[in-house]
Image (tube, rainbow, N blue to C red):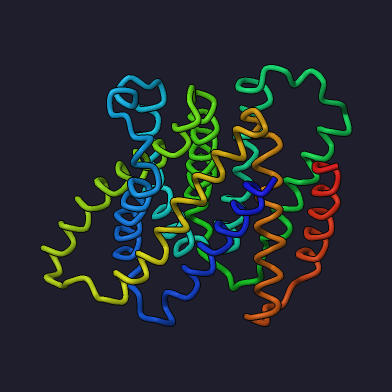
Amino acid sequence: MYHLILTIILTSYLFFAFKLFPRFKVNTFHAIIMNYVTCVSTGVLFSYQDIDLDHISHSSWLFPTVILGMLFISVFYLIAYSSQKTGITITSVASKMSLIVPVIISLFFIKKDFAHYTLLDYLVIVIAILSVVLSSIKKEGARDKSNLWIPIIVFIGTGTVDTLINYVNSLFTHVSDEKTSPIIGFFSAGCFGIVVLIYQLLKTKKGISLNSIIAGILLGIPNYFSIYFLLKTLSHFDSNGAFVFPITNIGVILFSTLISLVFFKEKLSTSNYIGIGMGVLALVCLLF
């Protein structure tokens, strides 16, 4: 259970880190690239005794993990683009709603013993999804509705990432894979991002600030472990994404909301309170 708690805490930390970037004049793109470099370095230092290149090269999870790495960085920038074009609210809801994808895939394709699920179990999963959506809705001004197709791609992209994480986890044949597969994923994301970074630096003729480098390091270490502990959590629950992803999302929302209320004095709407209440109910049902 502590793997799940650590996943929730570290994932929440990542959201708040991004929120603080503008305050310290951090270039988000540069910080993300440094983050991936740090993720790979952290993973190598943490698991160098478990790295077996021959085993990795013949692993069934190698190719999907490489694809997953490229999706990591692509989906992130797609979310940023969608936030600018259609608004944070629509993008946030689309991203949160995407947990439906790994839940369905887990129930009907990856998880083979879902027959014991009762009507109550399915009802709790629906409540969990609704709680995530309601808790994510924030008020904002009107936006151009001509680009509403973008959040649909965000929904598909984010859902695909979570599904691939669950699928990759189901392919693990050894406990050391949980340490080494994130390295491959982040290495793939880093290589893809560095190509874009080099192009940008040559075009703008600007360097990377020290703030962005430090921010990338502070982001990268917890980012690696957030994925590592998520994989450990999935393994503990037999790759049951129908359980893990709703409970993780609810946990992140509840923990992030608490931090936002205490440190950022964030105000919540009625729908937020309803969503949080439903989340607590779903959390209790899922855990007990």
The quarter of the picture where residue 270 lies is bottom right
The quarter of the picture where residue 115 lies is top right
Residue nearest the viewer, comparing 196 with 187: 187
Say above or below: 116 vs 181: above
- Residue 104 left/right relative to 210: right
Residue nearest the viewer, comparing 134 with 40: 40
Residue nearest the viewer, comparing 251 with 203: 251
Quadrant of the drawing holding the N terminus: top right
Report x, y in % for residue 135: 72, 60
Report x, y in % for residue 258: 71, 70
Count of labels in the image:
0
Residue at 69% x, 68% y is 257
Residue 204 seen in the figure: yes
Residue 70 seen in the figure: no
Say above or below: 165 vs 272: above
Report x, y in % for residue 136: 67, 60
Residue at 76% x, 53% y is 131
Say above or below: 98 vs 145: above
- Residue 8 left/right relative to 210: right
Report x, y in % for residue 260: 65, 74
Residue at 39% x, 58% y is 220
